[in-house]
Image (cartoon, grey):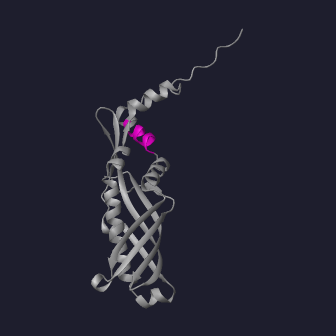
Amino acid sequence: MSALPPDEFADQVLIAAAPPERVGEVVARLVGDEIKIGPMPVGRGELASATAIGRRAAVRVAACADPDWHQVVTVPIDLSVSIDMAGRTARYRGTVEVRTRLRLQLERPCTVTVHVDRVAPDDVQTSVQAIGLPARVLGWVGGIQETVAQQVLDYVNDLISSPRFETALHIDVPALLERAWEADLVVVVPEADED
């Protein structure tokens, strides 16, 4: 075997510590299967109230082309929106895709830290369609899309800055190795030959 320079070793440690499929699993657990937004005021004079229920689909993680970031994370959410106004309910269905970027960094004493880019308005793509006549009569799809997109943006940025999310973004390498040693996973000792 040939020697591996320290900088290349560090790069390989980063890749091994946070492979895309594992990052996707962690993000999915942190986001949860369902999110609820609202009730929130919508429409002219904010006379109506909207509630959105989102169900997360499979999180996608890919390599990032930006040299300052390592991975792009996309979280798709299926939305069900209901609007209540003067005792009438209109329903909408839609989708949201939230994108952010991750950077992996080695930090002292021996930690891999995942930095998450703050989600900007352009990182949230929303599409909402009216279901049935009452929703089409209200005709507030544009306003609903903007309101839901802003609420999702706020929700995701609050989640990213939460202590729970912050804790999950630090990988303690010595602690991992200690657990691996305790489980006999670091060094595989072949069984002795029987004579």
- The percent position of residue 58, horizontal first and vertical second, equals 51, 59
Instruction: Let me know if residue 68 is in the magenta part.
Output: no
Q: Above or below — where is 9 with respect to 51?
A: above
Q: For residue 193, what is the image quadrant?
A: top right
- The percent position of residue 63, horizontal first and vertical second, equals 43, 54
At x 50%, y 89%, the residue is 133
Q: Above or below — where is 7 with respect to 44?
A: above
Q: Nearer the viewer, residue 88 or 182?
A: 88
Q: For residue 121, what is the image quadrant?
A: bottom left
At x 30%, y 58%, the residue is 118
At x 46%, y 46%, the residue is 19
Main SS of the magenta segment? helix
Considering every residue shown, the one lying at the far top of the view is 195
Quadrant where the C terminus lies?
A: top right
Q: Nearer the viewer, residue 18 or 96?
A: 96
At x 40%, y 73%, the residue is 51
Instruction: Let me know if residue 16 is in the magenta part.
Output: yes
Q: For residue 109, what is the image quadrant?
A: top left
Q: Above or below — where is 54 with respect to 64?
A: below
- The percent position of residue 124, horizontal first and vertical second, equals 37, 68
- The percent position of residue 141, horizontal first and vertical second, equals 40, 83
Tell me where the magenta segment starts and ends, as one range: 10-18
Considering every residue shown, the one lying at the far right of the view is 195
Count the numbered circles shown. 0
